[in-house]
Amino acid sequence: MKRIGNDDTAPHPARRGPRTHEFFDVIRRGISDQPLRMRFGRRLWQRAGEGARRHNLVLIADEDKPRAAPDPLALVSQPQLDRTMEKACAKTNALTVLLEELR
């Protein structure tokens, strides 16, 4: 099983100082040429072969709304829980197809 880490707990040489919520102008090519203020949300990484890493970055738009307190249960067992649920759905679909073939 590959190690999946959260950038907030994994040591990284480029990481400096406390977590900030700095917004950046992002142009969504192919969607809109109008810049949108966004910040990084949750960042997950996974080691890949030969020292490479795979990253899953979430970008959050600045909607000028007051920030609500995060739900402490929202991150429990993530992303493992999502992957387990995806696998369970895939197995359910495969079993449904097999049962239909047997009828």
Image (cartoon, rainbow, N blue to C red):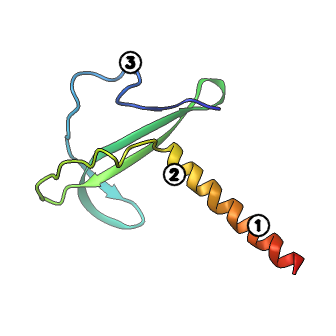
Give SS at disc 1. helix
Which of 9 and 12 lies nearest the eye of the viewer?
9
Residue 13 is marked as 3
Q: Residue furthest right?
A: 102
User: Which residue occupies 61% across, 31% down?
Assistant: 2
Residue type marked 1: Leu
Q: Is residue 32 above or below residue 75?
A: below
- Identify the residue position indicated by label 2 in the image: 82
Q: Earlier in the sequence, mark 2 or mark 1?
A: 2
Q: CA distance from mark 2 to mark 1?
A: 20 Å
Q: Quadrant of residue 92?
A: bottom right
Q: Quadrant of the N terminus?
A: top right
Report the amino acid beneath label 2.
Asp
Q: CA distance from mark 3 to mark 1?
A: 46 Å
Q: Which mark is residue 95?
A: 1
- Pointers 3 and 2 in contact (C-beta within 8 Å): no
Which one is in front, 14 or 103?
Answer: 103
Task: Answer with mark 3 or mark 1, whichever residue precedes in sequence.
Answer: 3
What residue is shown at x 23% (from left), y 31% (from top)?
19
The image position of residue 97, as x and y in percent, is 78, 73
